[in-house]
Amino acid sequence: MSSSFPHPAQLYHGLFRSFVRADGHPALARHEAPPASVPDPETGKPLRVATLDAGGPAICPSCTAQGFGGFVSFEPELRLAYACPQCRQFVWLPGA
């Protein structure tokens, strides 16, 4: 039987790793060896990662859960995405 979630190596394009905090809440941390780029969701062309930030409190724009996910920005388009530990989605932020 297959799982509804992607393999951990594919989750968040390999930019973040999941873990459970001491208080029992899921969270994300930067992957030790993240890729330099991830595919654009519309064109498939590689987008170069500019910054990775994980562990701070945020609200997921997809599931609206408050959690400790991760943000990633990309060059040269200055796009932004959020990785949510609750819904396990990689959400491209509109207008970014």
Image (cartoon, rainbow, N blue to C red):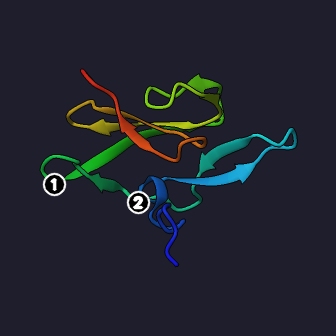
First in residue order: circle 2 vs circle 1: 2
Q: Is residue 94 left or right of residue 6?
A: left
Number of labelled discs?
2
Q: Give the SS element for disc 1.
A: loop
- The tag on residue 45 is 1
- Which residue shows up at 47% across the image and 64% down it? 6
Work out whether 70 lies above or below 13. above
Marks 2/1: CA–CA distance: 14 Å
Q: Position of residue 76 (x, y in %)?
A: 21, 36
| Rendering quarter of residue 73 | top left
Quarter placement of the C terminus = top left
On screen, residue 86 versus residue 60, left or right, reads right
Position of residue 43 in the picture relative to residue 59 (left or right) = left
68 or 64: nearer the eye? 64
Q: Residues within 10 Å of mark 1 (few under 14, many from 20)?
A: few
Badges 2 and 1: C-beta atoms under 8 Å apart?
Answer: no
User: x%, y% of residue 24?
Assistant: 83, 43
Task: Decide which of 36, 82 is in the foreground and name it.
Answer: 82
> From this viewpoint, which residue is outermost toward the front?
1
Q: Amino acid at mark 2?
A: Pro
- From the viewer's perspective, is 41 left or right of 60? left
Residue at the image point whose x is 39% and y is 37% from the top: 91
Location of mark 2 (residue):
35
In the image, residue 71 above or below residue 7? above
Q: Residue furthest bottom?
A: 1
The amino acid type, in three-letter code, at marker 1 is Lys
